[in-house]
Image: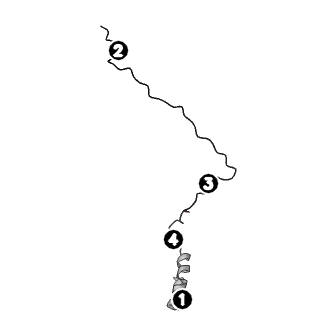
Amino acid sequence: MHNLQIYAGMVLNQMIQLMPGILLRGSTPAKPPKPRSKSPGWKIGQQRQRRIRYPIVKKRTLPSLKAQPKTA
């Protein structure tokens, strides 16, 4: 509460000039903003691994039931 007493005798223009500093000084629960631009990329000297190549699995064709002769 004593912080507000410092600003009690100021003129309105002085308060307006000091307002950004006052607001920045106060603590806030908000997290700082994330950087929004180019990503930092790979670190210097960091080893890269090639992706794992899995073998191709093809669907096999089933023989049609009409082509098979019926056994009695």
Of the image marks 3 and 1, the number of the one nearer the N terminus: 1
Residue 14, numbered label: 1
SS of the residue at dot 3? loop
Q: Could you tell me which residue is drawn at 57 percent across and 36 percent down?
A: 53
Disc 2 from disc 4: Cα separation: 78 Å
The 10 Å Cα crowd at callout 2, few under 14, some 14 to 19, many 20 or more, is few
If the image is split into quadrants, where does the C terminus sit?
Answer: top left
Residue 33 position, x and y percent, is 53, 65
Disc 4 from disc 3: Cα separation: 31 Å
Q: Quadrant of residue 67?
A: top left
Q: Is residue 29 above or below residue 72?
A: below
SS of the residue at dot 2? loop
The 10 Å Cα crowd at callout 3, few under 14, some 14 to 19, many 20 or more, is few
Q: Nearer the viewer, mark 4 or mark 3?
A: 3
Q: Amino acid at mark 2?
A: Gln
Q: Nearer the viewer, mark 2 or mark 1?
A: 2
Residue 43 position, x and y percent, is 66, 53
Is disc 3 in contact with disc 2, using a CB cutoff of under 8 Å?
no
In the picture of the structure, the residue carrying the numbered disc 3 is: 41
In the picture of the structure, the residue carrying the numbered disc 4 is: 28
Of the image marks 2 and 1, the number of the one nearer the N terminus: 1
In the picture of the structure, the residue carrying the numbered disc 2 is: 68
Q: Amino acid at mark 4?
A: Thr
Q: Which residues are magenta?
A: 32-61
Q: Residue furthest right?
A: 45
Residue 49, numbered label: none
Q: Nearer the viewer, mark 3 or mark 1?
A: 3
Q: Amino acid at mark 3?
A: Gly
Disc 2 from disc 1: Cα separation: 97 Å
